[in-house]
Image: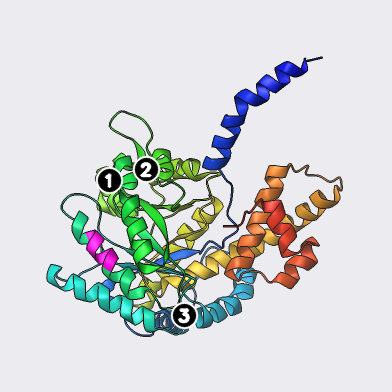
Amino acid sequence: MVPEHLLAELDARLRPVDAARLAAFPGEPSSRQPVHTCYVPADAVVPGLVAGWGSAALAALDEHGLPDLGLDAGLVAQVLPRVRAKLATEPVEDLRVDAEDGYRGAPDDEDGDVTAAAAVLAAEPALPPFLGVRAKSLEEATRRRGVRSLDLFLTGLAGAGRERAVVTLPKVTAVEQVSAFLPVLDALQDATGLALDLELQVETPQAVLGPDGTATLARMLHAGAGRVTGLHYGTYDYSASLGIAAAHQSSDHPAADAAKEAMQVAVAGTGARAVDGSTNVLPVGPTAEVHAAWQLHARLVRRALERGFYQGWDLHPAQLVTRYVATYAFFRAALPAAAARLAAYVSRVEGGVLDEPATARALATVVLRGLDCGALDVAEVEQATGLDRPALDALAGRRPR
């Protein structure tokens, strides 16, 4: 039998390791994750923006009809009423005002444009659950301009009844940029009263592999001292930086997969999320072109979901159609098997699949995501699983924020 003094020594030596691990990897937060982030240039923010995106998406659906998206036809017919309701009530889950690459205003206009955008949003009666701003990078040429735009936007948004906002930091190239930015975030938070979350955009090679040959994503994430809520893949900047020809720049390119897999490993267990990028093939023009763009977008959304990326970027209102059709179809297709396996796991019924706690967490999480976005209803989930929301949260290991 192992002597007690050796067990006590083992505890003493590993207790600091346990504490450090729990601090660095607190687990999945209980907060809802949006299915997308919609980027709107600061100079394009107008009253009724969010409702306008929903109306435009519905108009595109009515005008062009839905093509074959490579999904089960019965499932698509089942989700379409839900998608229409979503577009009419909450078309945008996460809105990011863009003062970086998407912004097309003149340098002298940026102060006015970001201030006006904040004023418009502050006056809106209903805003998305998640809202924030992307300013310019912390590289020397854009550093002060970016911070100034953040200051103007967040100051204008303060006092509008919101408690949180997201700051997206693009083109991060060094761990030191993240740590140096934290005092700026603290100052902005103190000045505005907004709790500020930080997203890092992975769109440079240096964000993935440092000059010394070491992986940098995890170091950047942990340098954020708990503020970083997501790593967002930048499809086109990252692809271009690797010399990939424009015609082949896509979120399903092997180089994109390599970067995003590194992102997934870096965020695992930290409470931050890995987020897919965008497609710039927009559903506009004649019906044939709209259908082709929808088919591409639906395929990429479905592909991302299958690989564990539950959020991506949308750049145009009509992309909301396929964002929700593909997402809702994914979660509704997953429910029957997930519900049966969860019910068996909880009751310890023997069956053809022996699930472990980690798998039960994954099964509960996929059901919770379906509930969060509106693909599933509470009543049908409870009937299928025999579990209520708190029980699913507990199985998923979600923690309060």
Horizontal side of 167 relative to 347 (left or right) equals left
Q: Which residue is mark 1?
A: 244
In the image, residue 15 lies at what x, y percent? 62, 30
Q: Which residue is mark 3?
A: 61
Q: Are marks 1 and 2 in contact (CB under 8 Å)?
A: yes
Identify the residue at image location x=58%, y=40%: 22
Figure check: 6 above or below 354:
above
Pick whichever, 204 or 116, lies toward us.
116
Queried whether the magenta region covers residue 286, the answer comes back as no
The mark nearer the N terminus, 1 or 2, is 1
Q: Of the residues shown, which amino acid type is indicated by label 1?
A: Ile
Residue 122 seen from this side: yes
The mark nearer the N terminus, 3 or 2, is 3
In the image, residue 163 lies at what x, y percent? 47, 69
Give the Cα separation between the discs numbered 1 and 2: 9 Å
Residue 45 seen from this side: no
Q: Which residue is mark 2?
A: 255
Pick whichever, 148 or 29, lies toward us.
148
- The boundaries of the magenta stretch are 146-151
Q: Of the residues shown, which amino acid type is indicated by label 3?
A: Leu
Secondary structure found at label 3: helix
In the image, residue 144 lies at what x, y percent? 19, 57
Of helix, strand and loop, which mostly describes the magenta segment?
A: helix
Horizontal side of 72 relative to 91 (left or right) equals right
Number of other residues with Cα within 10 Å of mark 3, as a class: few under 14, some 14 to 19, many 20 or more: some
Give the Cα separation between the discs numbered 3 and 1: 33 Å
Number of other residues with Cα within 10 Å of mark 1, as a class: few under 14, some 14 to 19, many 20 or more: some
